Every structure is written in structure tokens, then in C-alpha cells.
Amino acid sequence: MSQDGVCKLNGHPSENGGAMKTRPLLNRRLDGLGTTIFAEMSALATATGAINLGQGFPDTDGPESVREAAVRALRDGRGNQYPPGPGVPELRQAIADHQHRFYGLSLDPDTEVLVTTGATEAIAATMLALLEPGDEVIAFEPFYDSYAACIAMAGAQRVPLTLRAPDFRPDLDELRALITPRTRLLLLNTPHNPTGTVLAPDELSGIAALAVEHDLLVVTDEVYEHLVFTGAHHPIAALPGMRERTVSISSSGKTFSYTGWKIGWVTGDAPLVAAVRAAKQYLTFVSGGPFQYAIAEALALPDAFFTGFREDMRRKRDLLAEGLRTAGFRVYEPEGTYFITTDISPFGDEDAYTFCRALPERCGVAAVPNSVFYDDPEAGRSQVRFTFCKRDDVLRDAVERLARLG
Ligand code: PMP
Ligand code: GLN
């Protein structure tokens, strides 16, 4: 462990000792994935005292009533011992109710819902459950970093479908051309981190048609489902022919601003959920007990909570977007998520990673380079992501600091 608390797994041979001298500790599948960019940039922000607009976590906790529900569960001894593997019945029911309330989807809470340790575990368990070594997975690029890692851990191959600036829309002809006999799965993310793209109904039906035509599985990461500013969130699972081939993933972290609780979930047809559950059993067995009861209450909050949260975030998006533009960034306005992707070319020819390494020293703000989310770093060479899930005064301070970049 280094001083910044970041695990440097690719240690020098002399640190590895004995027989391991001849071989790096980190296996080939995870080569290059030793430290996540979020950990790296957050450590840099902490070390320099910079405002952290890199890693996406709110600096204000979610609803008080939800926190109190967790405290109550802890005190009442609900979930303090291993809860049921698929999740506590109250939460599974609440997830099923949520899917019906917002999207008209009907799910059996006993067989079609699985509670996971965040969406992160849901992604890992899904990839480990559904993929054979050598399978190909088509995913939007830039991709959320855990996709690359989980596909790799499953021994499968990622195949990027590049979302290109300035619009970051998927090209369905390109998608068709990427499908081979080895393609097993399409991995979607809408709203999309980091670009903020929200898949439109015609894009979703085009993707669904290809999935049906080629008999592909679809895994859809919808953790930002309640952060859509333009249009609406449409789960692909609701489209004809998709239910039986779609694993939907979401999480309480973003929607309820308790990212540290790590309560996520998987929904889908019973055989798909059973497959994911098989893998999940051997990753964590079960997920954090008392928090599950609290999230069950959170999912039943009135509509006013969900619209209020979204409108608050929209205001923050506009505040940060305006500030970034004034500071000289090219801003790609996101339709959803709580991230803004920018282009840093107006500041010179530096690549995004070098820019982000230096940014805290230059002006006291930390951000994340999108280049690391591309297989071809050139494609995202000048893209930098900022989050706006921070207090208004923090965003204003950050914007003032960024204005000094000049
Ligand atoms: N998917 C995406 C697209 C994300 O941005 C994140 C970060 N919240 C996750 C998955 C992981 O979610 P969780 O914190 O629930 O594990
Ligand atoms: N999802 C958040 C982001 O994209 C945090 C991810 C993480 O820390 N693994 O910033």
C-alpha cells in the first residue's frame, strides 16, 4: 500500500519476493487495470486539498428519513445477521414496485429481483455468470471502467462501439457491423457515464431489433435512471422481445445520495436472475442488511422526491456548465447523469490525463480524464469529466478557481 492509500499491485520484482520475482503479481487479465482512475484522482484531490469534481459522489447526504430508517433497522436488529441471499423480501418487493410504478414492468420479487452490493457487484456477477472465455461483449466507449475489468475477469473480449463527440450518439450501422458469431452480449449504459447520453426510443428499438435478430443478451446499467434532464428514461427491458434476454442493473447510490451504502440490484426474467444469483453467492453471498430496509423505504418515496432531486441536479448542471464555458472549456451538455464532459483543446495540446494530473496544482480542482475510458486513448485525448453533484457554494468556488486557468 502506498502513502496515498492506493494499492500499487504491479509492484517491483524486489517487493514481490521469492518465486514471484519472475512474474508480475497482477494477472494478465487485469493488466493495466491496477488502480481505478477514480481512486487515483480522489487521492490526488485529498493530497492537494483540491475541490474534488472527479469521482461522482455527493457532498450532501440523501433524505433524512432514509438515514433514520437505516438507524432503526440497525437498532431493531433487522439485517444485522446475514440477510437472505437474494435480498430482504421488503426490498425485493420495493424494487418490483418501483419498476412497475415508473416503467410499467411487472416482476416477481421472489424470482426476478436480486439485491447486490452496489451496481458494481451486479455488473461483476452478471459478467461472470453469463460469459464464457472468448465471448465478445459490445459496449459503448467511453466505458465505465468496471465494465472493462469485469469483462476481462470473465475471460471475455470487449468490443467498443464508440460514441463520438460532439453528440455521443451510437451509430446502429456500426453496431451491426461489430456483431460476430462470438458476440454474446450487448452492454448498455443509459444515462451514460461519462458522456451524459440518454438513449432515445428509436435508438433503443434499433438496438433491441439487433439483439433479437442475432439472439444476443443485453445487460443495461441504469444507475442514473432518475437523473434525466432531456427526454425520459426508457428501460430496454420494456420493449417487445427484450424481457427474456435483458438483465437490468440499478443502484440506490446515485438516486438516494448514499453511495457508501452499496445497495444495488438486478432485475429480469427468472432464469437470467438465477444465473446472476449463482455468481453473486460466491462474490459476497449477501449484501449489507440494515441498509436494505432503508432503501426499501427510499424506493417508496413520493414522486416529489424524484422530481425534486432531478430538478436540483439540473440547476447544478446549468451552474457548472456555465462556469466551465466561462472558464474556456468546450462543454458537451449532458442529457442525464451528474457528469459534464468537456473538451480541453482551448487550453492547449495537453492530453486529458496529463491535464487532470496537473489540474489540482494549477487551480485547486480535480477532474477525471475520459481518455482512460477508451480503448483508443486518442479518441478521448482532449476530454475531461467534471461532476456537479456538489453543494452550490462548492460548485461556485470550483468555477472561480477554474476561471483562473486562462
Ligand atoms: N455504473 C455506472 C455507470 C456508474 O457510474 C457507477 C457509479 N455509481 C456504478 C455503475 C456503480 O454503482 P454502485 O456505486 O452502486 O456500485
Ligand atoms: N460512479 C462514480 C463515477 O463514475 C464513482 C465510481 C467509483 O468510485 N467506482 O465517478
Image: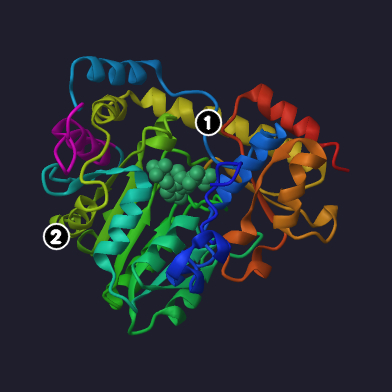
Amino acid type shown at disc 1: Pro
Task: Tell me where residue 295 appears, x and y as whole percent.
Answer: 29, 29
Task: Tell me where residue 242 appears, x and y as whole percent.
Answer: 25, 62
Amino acid type shown at disc 2: Pro
45, above or below 182, in the image: above
Q: Residue at x 38, y 83 (%)?
A: 180
Neighbour tally class for label 1: few under 14, some 14-19, many 20 plus, Cα within 10 Å: many
Q: Which mark is residue 58?
A: 1
306, above or below 194, in the image: above
SS at mark 2? helix
- Image quadrant holding the C terminus, namely top right
Q: Residue at x 23, y 20 (%)?
A: 73
Judged from this view, the residue extending furthest toward the front is: 18
Neighbour tally class for label 2: few under 14, some 14-19, many 20 plus, Cα within 10 Å: few
| Residue position marked by numbered label 2 in the rendering | 271
384 or 321: nearer the eye? 384
10, above or below 248, in the image: below
Give the magenta range. 80-101
- Quarter assignment of residue 29: bottom left
